[in-house]
Structure formats: structure tokens, C-alpha cells
Image (spheres, grey):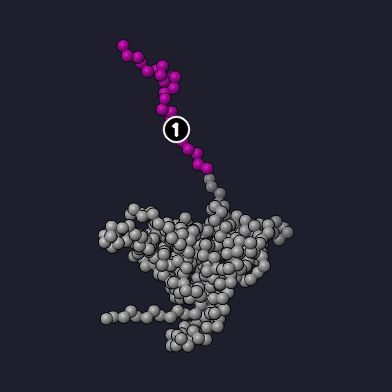
Amino acid sequence: MTTAAPMPVPFPFSAIAGQPHLRQALLLAAVDPGLGGVLIEGPRGTAKTTAARALAELLPGAPFVTLPLGASLESLVGTLDLGQALAGHELKFAPGLLARANGGVLYVDEINLLPDALIDSLLDAAASGVNVVERDGISHRHAARFVLVGTMNPEEGTLRPQLLDRFGLCVQLRNIEDAAERQAIVRARLAFDVDPQGFRAKHAEAEAALAAALVKARAIVADASALPYGDDVHEAVGALCIASQVDGLRADLVMLRSARALAAWEGAAAITADHVQRVAEAVLLHRRKPEAEGAAAASAPATQNSQRTPSTNGTGQNNASDQDWGAMPPEPVGIERVKPLRPLIPSQTAQQAIPKKA
């Protein structure tokens, strides 16, 4: 009789260093799973999988479900239980990965390589918290409230804008260039690999504090009367979304919900414009139009982003530093007389000189 190999213990979330934007985005999605999940873009080896697995451990009794690239739509959303149907002539629903992930974290590595049909179902369930199955003679609904975490390497392709917009938050990771920070991360990972349980024991208190803070923040978000906000918050959200030239109003709604989740996480009495500013980049990164990015770059001082008008030295002459060294002086071009063209239609005199046929 063979026994299943034990699952590796996860790296503590509180010990993850060097990725503050990733940590914040994942915590906000855990506070309010209705945000629509987190899309993580970045190269290999930037703690994407480690952070997602560690997040599930902070949620009490939360499962961590991985969607493989070769999964079918039936295995994701569920389908007819053929064994029950053949044995007892009874239609019964066989739950899929969405049902298993309810209350936990659903992790999809290289989500940009999945078929669009699977991504649509994933995002629908992540945003609504409900999975609806209408197929094979089955009409079934079940809760599917989970934190969706998708990762992708932009070098291997991207998602269509319509699918990108369905993700609540997006984080773009980069390789860590600071030598001291890289060394600290490597030392922590080596210490965990040598003694996982001892390493986790050192961070047990911090992990318990994070888990308790998540429970408290979730309770605050669930209270519809908590965390009021005024017109200044709406104005800040609208201005940021208009400047980014986003399509539709999903960005506005997600930004408000993200700001509310951040305020709940920090135990604030109300949502402020500062909360909006701190979540705006994660909301707009994957929704911002390219021309809006150019406009943001052009908002720097005009002397750095626009062509300068050559200055003069008071005599009408351009300074030497403003000369166009690639220009050539104009050269005179002579005019050559061209022989006039002979008309194709004979003149009236020539027509009279032509003898008529008898």
C-alpha cells in the first residue's frame, strides 16, 4: 500500500521580503475577495507562487487549489457525475475546482496560456462569488468565493484587454537590484530550506497577528455601514480613472472597494483620498491606455519632454549649444530652359493646308 507524500510546508507570509506591492495586493484581495483577484506579472523566481501559497495559510481552514494548464472546463466548473448517473439513473452534480477552492485561494500559474473559456469562467466566479453550471441536463449553483491569484510572464504573451480588465488588481514584479536586499532574501530562503519548522516557529507570532488582522478586516468589510467616505474620495477616484483613460466604470468600482479594503486592514475610521492614492496603481496598471502612459510621462517639466526653442544671445543669432549639427546649408539651384513641347493637335492653318480627298 502506497502512501501519499506529505505536502511541503509553506513559507511564512510574514517572512516574504522585497515585494511590498505584492504583499499589499494579496492582503487586499483576501480582505475582499469580491475585488476579482490579483494578476501578478513578472519574471521567474520573484516569489509569485510562494506568496500565493503563504496567503492561503493566513485564512482559517482555507484550501489552496492549483489549476493546471491542461485542465478542462468540466474539471474547473463541475459536470455530471457519470458514475451516479449510470448506477442509479440519477442526475447528480460532480463539483469541480471552483467548488474545492471555495473559502480559499485558487492559484493559476501562467494564466495567459489558458484558453479564454476557462479564464472567463474563473473571472466570473471570482467577481460574483457564485459558480453557475448549465450543462449536461444539470442546472446547479454553488458558492465559489475564493481569492484568485494568477501569474504570467509578459515575455510569453499577454491577455486580451477584455480579460485583463476583469482582474481586480495587478502587480508588476521586477528583479531585485539591491545587493543587500537580495542577500537577505537568499539567507531567509536557505534558513527555511534547512529547517522549515524552526523557521516557521520564529515567525509564528507574526503569522498569528496577520491572520487575526485579516479576520478583523473581513468583518469590517462585511458591515455595509462601516467605513464611510465623502465626495473627496469620489473625486479622487474619478480623476485618476479619467487621467488613465480607462474603459467603462469597473476601475472606479474596484478602486473604491480596494480603498475600503485598505482602510479596513489598517483599522481606519473612514476611507480617505490617501487610501485611494495608495491602491490606484494596482487598479490602473493593467487598465491604463498606452496614450495615457505617454501623457503621464509628458507631465514632467516641459524642458525635458518637448523640443526646446533655440535661445538667442541677444543679437538674433542662435547659441552654439542650440545649433542643429545635422543640418546642411541650402545650395543655389540653377534654372535650365526647357525646349517647348509641340502640340499634338495640329493648328487651324495646318488643317487648312491638308488637301481633302476626292
In percent of the image, x 45 and y 85: which residue is there? 196
State whether residue 80 is above or below residue 358.
Answer: below
Report which quarter residue 83 is drawn in: bottom left
Residue 59 location, x and y as percent?
50, 73
* Quarter occupied by the N terminus: bottom left
In percent of the image, x 58 and y 68: which residue is there? 219
Q: Which residue is mark 1?
A: 341
Q: Give the camera-side residue of 231 and 179.
A: 231
In percent of the image, x 39 and y 60: which residue is there? 77
State whether residue 151 is above or below residue 244.
Answer: below
**Residue furthest front as drawn:** 88
Relative to 178, 151 lies left or right: left
State whether residue 226 is above or below residue 50.
Answer: above
State whether residue 14 is above or below residue 323.
Answer: below
**Residue furthest right as drawn:** 314
Crowding at dot 1, Cα within 10 Å, few <14 / some 14-19 / many 20+, comes out as few
Report which quarter residue 79 is drawn in: bottom left
Residue 264 in view, yes or no: yes
The total of numbered circles placed on residues is 1
Could you tell me the amino acid type at mark 1? Answer: Leu
Q: Main secondary structure of the magenta part?
A: loop
Residue 115 location, x and y as percent?
38, 59
Residue 47 in view, yes or no: no
Disc 1 secondary structure class: loop
Give, as a single range, the part of the protein colored magenta.
335-358
Q: Give the camera-side residue of 82 and 154.
A: 82
Residue 307 location, x and y as percent?
61, 58
Relative to 250, 78 lies left or right: left
Is 220 part of what is drawn in magenta?
no
In percent of the image, x 62 and y 56: which residue is there? 238
Relative to 104, 278 lies left or right: right
